[in-house]
Amino acid sequence: MLSVKNLKVRGLAPISFDLHKGDLLVVRGPSGSGKSLLLRAIADLDEASGEITLDKGSGARMAPHNWRRKVRFLSAESGWWGEQVGAHFTELARAKKSANELGLAAKLFASPVAHLSSGERQRLSFVRALEGSPKVLLLDEPTSALDEVAAELMEKKILALQKDGVILVVVTHSTAQAERLATHTLTIEDGKTRFEAR
Amino acid sequence: MNYISLSYWDLALASVLILANGMISIWFRLGLEKTLLINTTRMLVQLSLIGFVLKFIFVQTSPWWTIGLALIMVAVAGREVAARLTTRLKGWWSYGIGTTTMFFISISTTLLAVAFVISPDPWFAPRYVLPLLGMVLGNTLSGISLGLETLITTLKRERVSIEARIALGHKRFEAIEQPVRQALKTGMMPIINAMAASGVVSLPGMMTGQIMAGADPVEATKYQILIMFLIGGATASGTLLAVLGSAWRLSDERGRLRLDRLE
């Protein structure tokens, strides 16, 4: 279980919620309302007061890199540090299989990162975020750079992960997508938050 | 020593050359005229003053005069490190890291040369200690400034990829290893390149000065080689300390990137 208690994110009222295995929380709100900051705070990428636990293990007491291996944040803007795509993966065979499920050819792993389209980057960084099988996935607009077909494949993959017991927190601007995916919603409006089960 | 003494008129004549810098700046609208004027004036005042100060200190018998001037030189060098950065760490950190690094590296390097290599009598002989310290400081200052500037600009430019690594569970220094390596390389390259060029492309300042003052060229060369080794070692270790100190400050114990600690 992912438990968030009195999490204070800049500009937002304290946030509390509990999510269990297989729950998918969709976070909604206007641009600049603090959705990404909330995800970053849960991943311990920004300083924030409050308590976050995963299966009763406190995030603050866990080594930060171990916490982030379990609670994985995927930014809307994908980051790459090597020349070749393949250099960013440690579980290459598994990554190629996941990439294939998202409509990507295995040969992309041998390409230079500079040759990738924004949609390919977004899907490959999603595949990379699955390495090490995190228990919680914090996805910031995971389909923002995708066409309809690719977005559909991505949603399918997200639902498969949910079925496998992964806890997901997804930021999206699409009402239709929120309807299709959410088991819970967190709506942010004027600094106030509303958590609801669906 | 047998050398040709320069008159102030000789210097005034040579100063005409600096006008070329001003003309280039005006012609290409570089906006460097004001900086050029201020820095030329600073150079004139500082060098004129240090000439009189050194003349005074050379005849003193107490080591405290040498130590005092050495500390002032280190403090000014530390301030200069911070001043050269386009983006500084908030508060006293840039000045603190610059000065602390300068202090330990330049003093230990100079002492090493004085105690084990040159062994002047007395040990604090300002004629040896202060020029050596000045040369070590000047070059270490350049290395540290270049290293820190590269570190900060690279961390800012590569923020997305660094945070992607942090989010994937990479440890603190693992996530910022590329900017740190780049910064160290940039800080150390000028002195490495200078070593390759010296004696063929360039005759370094100290050696030239000694030769013009009438010293034996072979003896002057030996001093220059010593200086190159001192500068090389001091620049490498100074850049390493300053870059690692700043990298430590720009990340935290939870492995986060802390660009909010920049001005």
Image (tube, rainbow, N blue to C red):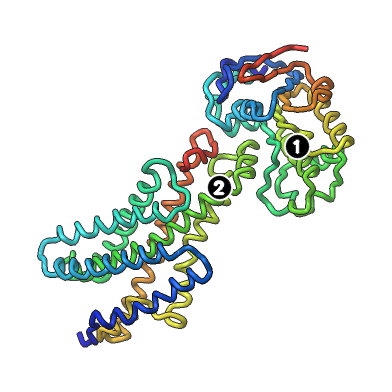
- Residue B152 placed where, x, y %? 51, 49
Which chain does the residue under circle 1 lie in? A
Location of the C terminus of chain A (image quadrant):
top right
User: What residue is shown with label 2?
Assistant: B155
Which picture quadrant has residue B213?
bottom left
Instruction: Say few, some or many: other residues with alpha carbon within 10 Å of mark 2 (under 14 / 14 to 19 / 20 or more).
Output: many
Separation (CA) of disc 1 from disc 2 = 23 Å
Kind of residue indicated by mark 1 = Phe
Would you say residue B197 is visible in this rendering?
yes
Q: Residue A126 has which mark?
A: 1
Do the residues marked 1 and 2 share a common chain? no
Q: Could you tell me residue A88's position as x and y percent?
A: 70, 46
The one nearer the camera, A119 or A111, is: A119
Q: Is residue A70 visible?
A: no
Kindly state the secondary structure of the residue where label 2 is placed.
helix
Q: Is residue A41 above or below residue B79?
A: above
**To which chain does the residue with label 2 belong?**
B
Residue A28's place in the image compared with B98, above or below, is: above
User: On the rendered image, what quadrant is the N terminus of chain A found in?
Assistant: top right
Q: From the viewer's perspective, tell me whether residue A168 is left or right of residue A106.
A: left
